[in-house]
Amino acid sequence: MRLLLLGGTGEARELAAAVPERVRVISSLAGRVSEPRLPVGEVRIGGFGGVDGLVDYVRTEGIDAIVDATHPFARTISEHAALAGARTGVPVLLLRRPGWRQPDGADWHWARNAEQAARRIDELAERAFLTTGRGGLAAFAEVRAWLLIRCVEAPEPPLPAAHRILLDRGPYTVDSERELLRRFGIQLLVTKDSGGSHTSAKLEAARELEVPVLVLARPAPPDVPSVSTVPEALAWLSSFAG
């Protein structure tokens, strides 16, 4: 059996390491980070060239199943995976960790997208901590508030006039996030509803310091079967791998 595993998430790496030996896993990473954390086994890096390119790849490589374990905000590749599955008849599974739940006592605000979040920042704070990643930062270019922008790699312009770039990669601790919020006088935390524990420490630090949180809601997932854990994905695969 040949499995195409989309995504460089922790869940994707965990699944790649857990599949039975009789399954050939090809992990596909987008290549947006120059030094990604690689899963075990065979890896390809880079895009497919749209839906048609993905369809050609699935057919050429004899792919038997696709697991989409990309980031919850990787909307385009998830849509392409669903369409490619429909066109080739190859089953597709969405492996997506649950979103975050607002803790008791926390002050959360929600935005439908980055553009709405950018407008809300100036309503809520003068100094904000932006942790939405380097992709899509152009939406925040006109924000008047001072922004601390944390990314794995340096972002490209346009960027807001008043900002500081912090290059770092998680996981983070509550203590380090609490110290960061205090050191920069942060009045608002801005984040995507990524879910998981890898970057959740900032939410607890914000709650402890009574810093409001502005959360970008997830895009709607494609209409394919979905699970939220690696064991569930393995169970799904077992029905095809025998």
Image: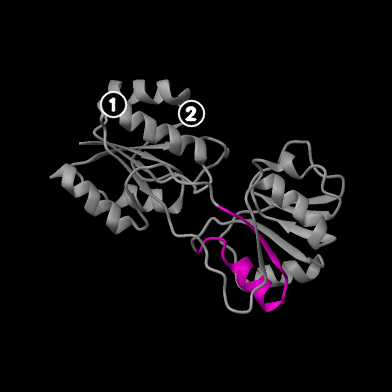
Stretch of the chain drawn in magenta: 197-217
Where residue 96 appears, x then y in whole percent? Answer: 42, 52
Q: Quadrant of residue 25?
A: top left
Question: Label 1 amino acid?
Answer: Thr
Looking at the picture, does residue 162 appear above or below residue 105?
A: above
Please, is residue 108 above or below residue 119 in the view? below
Q: Is residue 205 magenta?
A: yes
Check disc 1 and report the residue beneath it. Answer: 88
Please say whether residue 105 is one of the residues in the magenta stretch.
no
Task: Pinpoint residue 190: horizontal percent, then vertical percent.
Answer: 69, 58
Quarter containing the C terminus = top left
Q: Is residue 141 above or below residue 63?
A: below
Q: CA distance from mark 1 to mark 2?
A: 18 Å
Q: Please give the count of numbered marks on the rendered protein.
A: 2
Q: Nearer the viewer, residue 190 or 113?
A: 113
* Crowding at mark 1 (Cα within 10 Å: few <14, some 14-19, many 20+): some
Q: In which quadrant will I find the N terminus?
A: top left
Is 25 on the left or on the right of 215, as rendered? left
In the displayed orientation, state which residue is furthest to the left.
Answer: 242
Residue at horizontal 45 percent and vertical 60 percent from the top:
98
Q: Earlier in the sequence, mark 1 or mark 2?
A: 2
Residue position marked by numbered label 2 in the rendering: 47
Residue 213, image quadrant: bottom right
Considering the numbered disc 1 on the image, is that residue within a helix, a strand or a loop? helix
Residue kind at label 2, given as amino acid type: Gly
Seen in the image, is 235 located left or right of residue 15?
left
Residue 26 in the image: state x and y as whole percent.
33, 36
Quarter location, residue 203? bottom right
Residue 149, numbered label: none
Q: What is the x, y in percent for residue 185?
A: 82, 68
